[in-house]
Image (cartoon, rainbow, N blue to C red):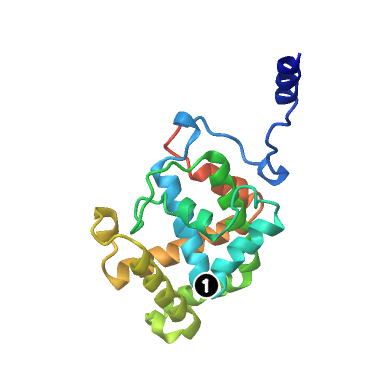
Amino acid sequence: MSVSVSVMQLNSLPAPTIPLILDGLPDPPVSEGVCPRRARLQIDLLLLAIEALDLGGSEAILSTANDLDLRGIIQNRVVLWRLRSTNPFRRYSQRRPLTLLEAKALVVITCYLARRLTVLVRQLLLAYQQLTEKQLSTEHHFRLSEYLERFRAHFRSRMNARRAGVMAYSSDEKLNELALDLLAQLLFCTGTSGMQRLWISLFDGEVG
């Protein structure tokens, strides 16, 4: 009798709830339900750009996870580091997979933070366009130069310089190009259905 009661109790346990905010992101048909390499890389780089834009970026990521009821997925700084370290470029890259649920949480946080930074991102992209038209270097705009310098420092301190993919960004010029491209992607996140469009773009060419 006690055995049957125990079985009934186990069967009545509620299934883990998925935060409603993640429902708007569809599950792509990827192998074993985990994120492909390019998606893991891209998500981490976008968060790296946010950290270069905002001195409190790291804290803002955790704070946003809490605000959006995502602490069941990203409980603390250590968990966040482990998730981001699934980026194969990382100095201490983790071999663990990044699940679709974890990736969705990171994408939602990225998009929310990008929206908070929309004005700054637009200003920096406009400044770059104006500097290019006048054939001036980015050093002529303090805020843009500061962002690029921070991004280069973050990238070099956290990525494994021995990896071929990282070696492609060995020069300041290449890292600046990457940092500016990430700014454009962050602005892309802020538009209509930006969250869904970013999510789908991460799997372009990965599913068919």
Residue 174 place in picture, x, y as percent: 31, 66
Can you say whether 40 is above or below 118 in the image? above
Could you tell me which residue is drawn at 76 percent across and 19 percent down? 5
Q: Is residue 132 visible?
A: no
Q: Quadrant of residue 102?
A: top right
Residue 93 place in picture, x, y as percent: 36, 52
Can you say whether 171 is above or below 138 in the image? above
Which image quarter holds the C terminus? top left
Can you say whether 95 is above or below 48 in the image? above
Residue 83 place in picture, x, y as percent: 48, 51
Q: Amino acid at mark 1?
A: Leu
Could you tell me which residue is drawn at 25 percent across and 55 percent down? 163
Could you tell me which residue is drawn at 55 percent across and 49 percent down? 198
Q: Is residue 29 visible?
A: yes
Residue 197 place in picture, x, y as percent: 58, 46
Q: Residue furthest toward the front?
A: 2
Q: According to the image, label 1 marks what residue?
A: 53
